[in-house]
Amino acid sequence: MSLILKNTTFINWETLAFSHAHLKVEEGHEGLITPYNDFGQMNISPEDELIDCEGKLVTKSFAVGHHHAYSALARGMPPPKKSPKNFLEILKYIWWNLDKALDKESIEASALATAIACAKAGATFVIDHHASPNFIEGSLDVIAGAFEKVGVSHLLCYEISDRDGQDKTEKALAETESFLQSRQGLVGLHASFTVSDNTLKKAVGLMRKYNSGIHIHVAEDEYDQQQCVKNHGKRVVERLHDFGVLESSKTILAHCLHINETEREVVKNSKACVVQNTESNLNNNVGFFNSRDLGKRIMLGTDGMHSDMIRSAQAAYFVGQSKDEIDFQVAYDRFVMVHNYLASNMFSGDGENNLVVLDYDAPTEINQNNFLGHFIFGFSSNNVQHVISDGRLIVKNRKVLHVDEKDVTAFARDQSKRLWKKL
């Protein structure tokens, strides 16, 4: 069975070239897209599904470079008992309190809600960073299963940390190894200031054993640097480099706000990829991302704030006007860099048969030459009409197809009430 997209205006995500064609989309991780100029020449079987895309834009679907699905049930939750006054207190009083309260059911609800939000916003691939200290074993399989029900591909990791004691650390290392034995994934670490040398060494050992990469928060706040210098006599990027974290092209460094010129040079000359999370940085009041001397391996994430990558790209551009070296093209390059990261590291689930159909009826002409202006100032996730993942339709006319969204919403609300009572 194939999916037939008739009368498309197809936009090549790499060149932004526009073409008018009928597309035959094959299912599967390696499924092909075959364009036809003449609809009559297409070999269509009775099992094929046809969607008329007249007046619509079709391009590669989106991917999230850094997410926290476990935060999905935080929206509207009770305020912390003590109001946080700095970044460390935000972690202690809000996020570390929340992640300790998670169990199997609330993790599943969070993952289902996140996958639906991603799919409806046009994203068919998510790189996620998870933490649930009181439900570690099997947590990644729960998330993977929920994502796959919706039809969203993934690259998961568990956030290994020493903040909850040695027993939790060992369980997190074991969960990571168990997951990597059967699935693609990364080795997650929280941040330098909650990871001992011994744990960092073990994590890098897993990275090398399974030919994976490290996914870690780097210098999101000055506190990370202060503790690294105090406890290890060096700065964060230097420490990670010395342990071999940066030797893998699969390694992801989230944030990288408070790094100096020497660290920037180390990152630029490494194989690692940096992920920018503009709105989360604004929310936590930790500073502004600046790409100066970091190279071009920079992609965009949401950091659990939401699941809308168009919004993330636009935020990166608007905030970056006064804080970064960014223009329309650079914003778009970061938006699609996650595809290059996934392809160059041979992760599956983000092939060319992952597509989004946009119902974007602009009052002005859109073409290859002015596409980026529409991308920054016109596009929104509200334009997402159909979404195709691995050649399979997962969102049709803005409705998810493979799970009952009303049932998931009811399940998530029940779980959020349970979760909030524990806080």
Image: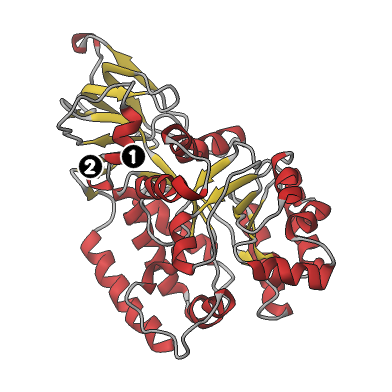
Instruction: Identify residue for label 2.
Output: 383
Q: Quadrant of residue 407?
A: bottom left
* Residue in front for this viewpoint, 22 or 122: 122
- Percent from the top left, x then y, of residue 268? 69, 40
**Which is more N-terminal, label 2 or label 1?**
1
Q: Secondary structure at mark 2?
A: helix
On the picture, is 397 further left or further right than 214? left
Crowd tier of the residue under label 1, counting other residues whose Cα lies within 10 Å: few below 14, some 14–19, many 20 or above: many
Q: Residue at 38% of width from left, 54% of height from top?
A: 307
Q: Residue furthest bottom?
A: 81
Q: Position of residue 44 (x, y in %)?
A: 23, 19
Q: Nearer the viewer, residue 402 or 231?
A: 231
Instruction: Tell me the kind of residue under disc 2.
Output: Asn
The quadrant of the picture occupied by the N terminus is top left
Is residue 308 placed above or below 232 in the rendered structure?
A: above
Q: Which residue is found at the position 54% from the left and 34% from the top?
A: 340
| Image: 176 above or below 57 | below
* Quarter in which the C terminus is drawn: bottom left
In the rendered structure, the answer to whether residue 295 lies left or right of residue 208 reads: left
Distance in Å between CA atoms under marks 1 and 2: 13 Å
Residue 250, placed above or below residue 361: below
Q: Which mark is residue 376?
A: 1
Q: Would residue 265 be visible to someone looking at this image?
A: yes
Residue found 41% across the figure and 51% down from its top: 148
Q: Residues within 10 Å of mark 2 (few under 14, many from 20)?
A: many
State the image coordinates of residue 50 (x, y, percent, origin top left).
19, 28
Instruction: Give the mark count.
Output: 2
Q: Find the residue positioned furthest to the front.
A: 322
Residue type, label 1: Ile
**Dot 1 lies on which element?**
helix
Residue 126 shows in the view: no
